[in-house]
Image (cartoon, grey):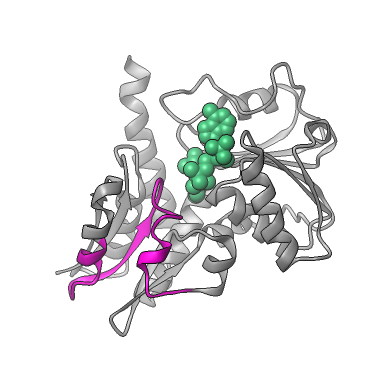
Amino acid sequence: MKYLYLLGYPLGHSISPAMQNAALRACGIRATRYLKAPTPPEKLQEMVKVLRGENCLGANVTVPHKQTILPQLDELSELAREIGAVNTILKQGGKLIGDNTDAYGFLQALRVRRINPAGARVSILGAGGAAAAAAYALAQADVGEIILLNRTLTRSIELADRLNQKFPQLALAINDWDALAQSQLIINATSVGMSPRVDESPAPKKFIFPKHAVVFDLVYNPPATKFLRDAKRDGARVIGGLEMLIYQGARAFELWTGARAPIRVMRNAATDALQEIQKPAASE
Ligand code: NAP
């Protein structure tokens, strides 16, 4: 038996195992399992040794290791290096290669809804790994302007500096909260609003979302976050994080197995698993 692992901590809420194992079964890859590997920070080094073992085919990496794992890997893809975060690890010739499929997943979630961000004014709330992946994807898709809005200013400045180096022509602003109301695309790439803190939103208090805007929350649990509920109330078009999760997972699956990802199977498994983890919260 070979294994793919999901490294993160805590991992109680993850629906990736259900989605990836359904994909493995659908592709007839019976001798491989995708397992949760809850890894507190002090156990990360030990877990990286497990990844180096022969029966490991690769891994996904999630909060809080997406950035801290970088120095423990042998190589990074160009994208992972530029984004500064790894969510997928590949094994090549015994080496651990860090990659990032979040940027692809993010853009694909827009594409399937026929939303083309080219030329748009985009506000991104957050400056962590997910925000960086979204910003790189948007910069590559010829977005008009990116406004980075983050609680910790130094982190927005650091991300803006990296974006500037790679995309010198890109129009960038930092912590210009007034620009939020004039944005065509508004993205929540913070963890605010995630279950169980479902009544929190990263938007400023009493903010009215522009009617013309597309509002995308990368959080997928709950599917309708307060951020999205408020945006919908104000007449904006809303997108939840599930579709991005599916496409980042599909890309990782293809990189690990070389098989074409069965998107419909993955979407059904992810949707069922998400409904399942909603149940206890709903009955409380
Ligand atoms: P991260 O690197 O830890 O970044 C977290 C971000 O959230 C930072 O910008 C942080 O701001 C901000 N934040 C946290 N608590 C906050 C609070 N109370 N008030 C304001 N800002 C706060 O995490 P990440 O990997 O970027 O992930 C961010 C979110 O995206 C998570 O919810 C994750 O589940 C989601 N995500 C979804 C997908 C998907 O496929 N749908 C993929 C990747 C990530 P500071 O810098 O000030 O700490």
> Hey, which quadrant is residue 151 in on the image?
top right
Residue 199 shown in magenta: no
* Res. 113 visible in picture: no
Question: From the viewer's perspective, is residue 50 above or below residue 110?
Answer: below
Residue 129 horizontal side relative to residue 37, left or right: right
* Residue at image point 31% right, 39% down: 10
**Which percent across, then down, holds residue 277?**
33, 33
**Which percent across, then down, holds residue 113?**
66, 51
Query: For the magenta stretch, what is the residue range?
Result: 48-76
Residue 56 shown in magenta: yes
* Residue at image point 52% right, 19% down: 199
Residue 208 horizontal side relative to residue 20, left or right: right
**Which percent across, then down, holds residue 256?**
36, 72
Considering the image in quadrants, where does the N terminus appear?
bottom left
Give the farthest residue toward the bottom.
93
* Residue at image point 56% right, 69% down: 79
- Work out whether residue 98 or residue 69 is closer to the camera in this orientation and state it: 69
Give the farthest residue toward the left.
1
Question: From the viewer's perspective, is residue 179 above or below residue 131?
Answer: above
* Res. 17 visible in picture: yes
Question: From the viewer's perspective, is residue 104 above or below residue 14?
Answer: below
- Work out whether residue 127 or residue 197 is closer to the camera in this orientation and state it: 127
Considering the image in quadrants, where does the C terminus appear?
top left
* Residue at image point 31% right, 42% down: 11
